[in-house]
Amino acid sequence: MSSVASTPRQPSGGVRTALEAWIVQWGGAVIDHVAAIGEFAFFCQRTAMWLLRRKPRPGTLLSPMHQVGVRSLPVVALTGTFIGMVLAVQSYFQFSKIGLENRLGAVINMSLVRELGPVLAATMLAGRVGGAIAAELGTMRVTEQLDALEAMGADPIHYLVVPRFIACLLLIPALTVMADFMGVVGGYFYCVFILGIDKHFYLYHSAQFVGGFDLVVGIFKSLFFGGVIALISCYRGFHCDAGAEGVGRAATASFVLSFVTILVLDLMLGIVLDVVYSVFWPSGAKLF
Amino acid sequence: MVAAGDNSVSVTVEDHPVVRLDDVTVQFDRQAVLRNLSLEVPQGQTLAVIGESGCGKTVLLKTIIGLIRPSGGHVWFDRYELAKMRKPLLMRIRRRFGFVFQQAALFDSMTIGQNVAFPLRQHGRYSDAEIREIVRDRLAEVGLPESILGKKPAELSGGMRKRVGLARALVLDPELVLYDEPTTGLDPIMADVINELILRSRRQHSVTSIIVTHDMRTARKVADRVVMLYPLSRLGPGESQVLFDGPPSQLDRSTDRRVVQFVRGEAGERLMELRRGSTHRAESGDG
């Protein structure tokens, strides 16, 4: 047996220092993240408090609603149409192999109204509006406009966050309905006019398997997506680092964080709502 | 009651302080910027706070208005302690303040008219016609024409933006106006225009003012009293952060070398530090 193996091992000075440095580094990172979550929770609580306590000032709501609703509508409609058609292209090949292409309507429309419509509308909102909100509020932070608001006795959360939150919350259902509708139209168009599926069967299976509950599920989920997009974007803008680089980072981080949160929320809400569905409609419609 | 400092403005200065700081300490991430700072500003006085970058001048202003909460000590405005005040009351108290930001901090999304009217809509119960009239008057006071009312801040020059910022700060007839480097980045003529406007606003509205500035011409022209702060990182043990506190005429007679160097704009030992740094880099082969 070698002498190294026979003596008890003691961490050398170098290893110990490296270990300490590693613990300090990771400990610091964990503390920072926990503090950031706490700050975000406090930010949400202040937004909720202002939302309940006082109405937004007249004139502050119109601009965010125009930005979230009117200006997002064309891009949501366009992407919805293409998603419907892409679903048709991708599903047709597999379904035709087993002779079930007539049931494509059910698959496409169910996927659209329950999952893809709300997620697509939310992703577009996070990219188009969320990034813009983070950049706008970040610029206001960097140029001391947020301080100026406070110095003049206006609360920035009441003045800037609440109207954006309300706009996202109220208008994302409309965007979701638009994405659903255009996706359904796009899917129908491609299946019936390009792939030559019988329109009677397409519509019959769609009506049989896609119900009001599915539409409500999609819209219900979208409310959560709209809320988190507004809160995350505003929070990132308010806590923006100095300079143009800081503003750019805030906009990017707001989109990435919103997108990840949307996906996580989608999964969790999907599971919960499926349980709710099976409780109320135990013998609900099955695809096959 | 005492006479106002050594400039020619005939404004009386009351003895009781409008602003009082008792042992105020402000720190960020365990890094202190202000330590045990005590200061009183009597009613009607114009105080200039000078000092090199990083000494905590802007932090001082933001602490006075409650944008930054001190880690220790007390900040009094009139009979209110701002440091411990709840936010809703602090928001109401702020109608008695005016704040002129370094880059004016005008709201980009609003027109000039909406910017100046903002405090009136936030705090007052004025009709639209009254607001229009007050805004026009305030812009005229700072020498700006009515034609800019519909313009956005981005369409104005730096000097005009500062004047709009001043008009906005004065629109509610505040008792205390805080100026954060009002003449920085302006040409000497425009800087003098801003100085004159500060003096005029003081004459017309009898406000108490605290001006943070690097500009010695501004400090000498508009201030009754000058306080010089020094960065904590450069202070010796037990030294006060306030290196000078007196009328502007006494600045040149200060016995503190650091005050004289700042007033004269001399690099002093900073130049030697720079040379030492260059030599050190050369010796260690960094170029």
Image (cartoon, helix red, strand yellow):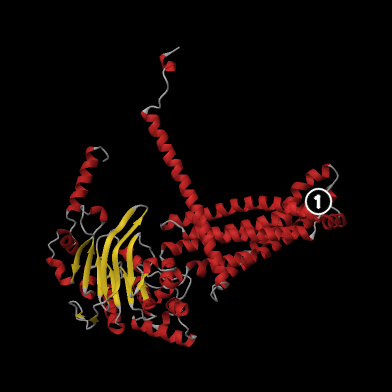
In the picture provided, is A141 more to the left or to the right than B203?
right
Give me the residue at 23% from left, 45% from top.
Answer: B277
The percent coordinates of residue A190 (x first, y second) are: 77, 54
Q: Is residue A213 visible?
A: yes
Q: Is residue B12 above or below residue A165?
A: below
- Under mark 1, the amino acid is Leu
User: How many discs mark residues in the rendered view?
Assistant: 1
- Picture quarter containing residue A99? top right
The percent coordinates of residue A36 (x first, y second) are: 49, 53
| Crowd tier of the residue under label 1, counting other residues whose Cα lies within 10 Å: few below 14, some 14–19, many 20 or above | many
In the picture provided, is A247 more to the left or to the right than B267?
right
Q: Nearer the viewer, residue A229 or A90?
A: A229
In the picture provided, is A260 more to the left or to the right than B168?
right
In the picture provided, is A17 more to the left or to the right than A127?
left
The percent coordinates of residue B4 (x first, y second) are: 20, 79
Residue that numbered label 1 is attached to: A104
User: Mark 1 belongs to which subunit?
Assistant: A
- Picture quarter containing residue B55? bottom left
Q: Is residue A179 visible?
A: no
The percent coordinates of residue B158 (x first, y second) are: 35, 70
